[in-house]
Amino acid sequence: ENGSSRNVLKPMDSEQLREYGHRMVDFIADYYKTIENFPVLSQVQPGYLHNLLPDSAPDHPETLEQVLDDVKAKILPGVTHWQSPSFFAYYPSNSSVAGFLGEMLSAGLGIVGFSWITSPAATELEMIVLDWLAKLLNLPEQFLSKGNGGGVIQGSASEALLVVLIAARDKFLRRFGKNSVEKLVVYSSDQTHSSLQKACQISGIHPENCRVLKTFSSTNYALPPELLQETISRDLEAGLIPFFLCANVGTTSSTAVDPLAALGKIAKRNEMWFHIDAAYAGSACICPEYRQYIDGVESADSFNMNAHKWFLTNFDCSLLWVKDKYALTEALSTNPEYLKNKASQANLVVDYKDWQIPLGRRFRSLKLWMVLRLYGSETLKSYIRNHIKLAKDFERLVSQDPNFEIVTPRIFSLVCFRIVPSKNDEKKCNNQNRNLLDAVNSSGKLFITHTALSGKIVLRCAIGAPLTEEKHVKEAWKVIQEEASYLLRKEKT
Ligand code: PLP
């Protein structure tokens, strides 16, 4: 065989896909079977991979075996195992067999579904599945696709926030004139995710017009409505234009829930756009007993939750609903000749390219559809409830140990805790908690992360990985306790 015939590429050979695909699925299934053998947090040093891989790409094909050997020997050591049952860091990012199969099918079809015409099923399935989920969450009718509203899958909560901020900005600029951008003011609490700051930076909101309102432990870090109203009144007096309020259901640091109904009234009175970020906790609201946490969503203009965080849908899948889809399309639509088609020109269809930043989009609704069909909503509710139960168990274990305290009341499946300060020495206490975090994570047995609340370093145990069971939570607590006693003993000697 000479070199040139060896290099004739058959990029999508069905039989090779069948053979390699089976082997890859076996490889991944074996990974899941042995996932507990890996250190949860990768322990490699920065730049580790540079010395392990060649300086340039191969000229000729290598075998799948060779690649998989490298994955085992060189890539997996640099992987942090997000799907490990002992992953309690950040918020989880869920995978599942259904989500995985949906992702695979999406890769298999390989479509780019920016306009309805580019794959009608992609747009229509997305509309249907988002309506299904809106009904499970009992969202107001105006968020359903039959009227002026509807849902769309974004890549991330950050993108969702950016597109609604831009939609709101342009709505206000149409009303007040395009030179009034310097007067537009955004409101949120100091617990709001940093994606709001980024969205403001991108969309040209003046940094001095971003009101980050202080929250307190006495109100569990929820945004005080009185403070919001006072700040808005002051801004109005100064001739500014309050235009966007971002409220939280389940903040990143501590799952704080803002008082949506009271905030919604203020937003309405001042004719502002009201966005709700429920990136993590939104999933829990499909359970009737947790639905109360989004009471007040009726007054929102947009609502967002990440199905990839706690809804068994492989990353990425961020769900955004809006009441006024035209606000999005007026801000984001373009109509170049090369994309014109009869269905779009006749306004018969939704073209999701006009609801998002990029043009191209994947067939992401397949995985959410598969999750909903292969599990069903009752199973999904049990899945959520089980995590919340495990978090309650962990909370009980922490509160029984006099060396530790619970820092904020647990609402969903995140427990915020720390080593208690001795003799009110907060500085020393912060260092102890930082040291404990490092010790626990370098054990490789579990992975937790931290935050700061009112200057206190707080450890976060976020329960929500799909494989987590009671034994993993107990084991995690044992490791934390052991490392803490070791640290505290060492300090005494
Ligand atoms: N909002 C909240 C409450 C979050 O917890 C997070 C991430 O953890 C985000 C937004 C940002 O999410 P994404 O990575 O989807 O942009």
Image (cartoon, rainbow, N blue to C red):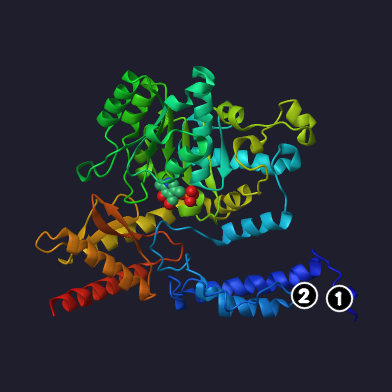
- What is the CA distance from the residue labelled 2 to the residue labelled 1? 8 Å
Q: What residue did someone put label 2 on?
A: 61
Label 2 close to label 1 by CB (< 8 Å): yes
Helix, strand or loop under label 1? helix
Q: Amino acid at mark 2?
A: Pro
Compared to 164, does 475 lie above or below? below
Compared to 320, does 60 lie above or below? below
Residue at image coords 31%, 19%: 237
**Furthest residue toward left:** 423
- Residue 45 vs residue 111: left or right? left
Compared to 461, does 75 lie above or below? below
Q: Amino acid at mark 1?
A: Arg
Residue at image coords 22%, 75%: 487
Helix, strand or loop under label 2? loop
Task: State the image quarter where residue 11 is shown.
Answer: bottom right
Pick the quarter of the image with the N terminus: bottom right
Q: What residue did someone put label 1 on?
A: 6
Task: State the image quarter where residue 341 is shown.
Answer: top right
Residue at image coords 57%, 50%: 368
Q: Residues within 10 Å of mark 1 (few under 14, many from 20)?
A: few
